[in-house]
Image: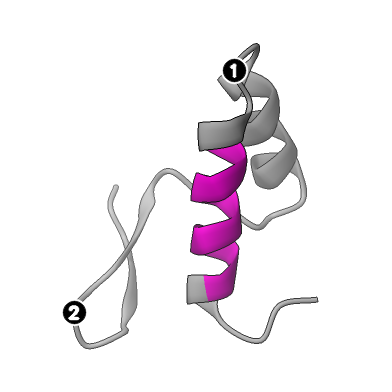
Amino acid sequence: MFDNVENVNDLFQKELLECHDDPFEVITRYCSQGLFNPFTIVTDDGIIKSNI
């Protein structure tokens, strides 16, 4: 569906900015699809690490 993490992040941020009613709906949808994990960070060199 997406070729890299940046595409997911860009789309996620765009949807968050455009949804004026319920930002939690967007967050929940991304989390449930496994596309977004609030406990995961991407370092400057592109390494994905757990933030827990």
Residue density around tag 2, few if under 14, some if 14–19, many if 20 or more, within 10 Å: few
Q: Nearer the viewer, residue 31 or 26?
A: 26
- Looking at the image, is 29 positioned above or below residue 7? above
Q: Which mark is residue 8?
A: none
Where's the N terminus, which quadrant? bottom right
Residue beneath the point at 63% across and 26% down: 19
Side (left or right) of 40 relative to 26:
left
Residue beneath the point at 31% across and 82% down: 47
Q: Position of residue 51 (x, y in %)?
A: 28, 52
Q: Secondary structure at mark 2?
A: loop
- Looking at the image, is 13 positioned above or below residue 28? below
Q: Nearer the viewer, residue 28 or 14?
A: 14
Q: Secondary structure at mark 1?
A: loop
Q: Residue furthest left?
A: 44
Residue 10 is one of the magenta-drawn residues: yes
Question: Of the residues shown, which amino acid type is indicated by label 2?
Answer: Asp
Q: Nearer the viewer, residue 19 or 44?
A: 19
- Looking at the image, is 46 positioned above or below residue 1? below
The range drawn in magenta is 7-16
The residue under label 2 is 44
The residue under label 1 is 20
Main SS, magenta region, reads helix
Q: Position of residue 52 (x, y in %)?
A: 29, 47
Side (left or right) of 9 relative to 41:
right
Residue density around tag 1, few if under 14, some if 14–19, many if 20 or more, within 10 Å: few
CA distance for labels 1 and 2: 30 Å
Residue beneath the point at 64% across and 15% down: 22
Side (left or right) of 52 relative to 18:
left
Q: Position of residue 25 (x, y in %)?
A: 70, 23
Question: Of the residues shown, which amino acid type is indicated by label 1?
Answer: His
Q: How many marks?
A: 2
Q: Position of residue 32 (x, y in %)?
A: 74, 42
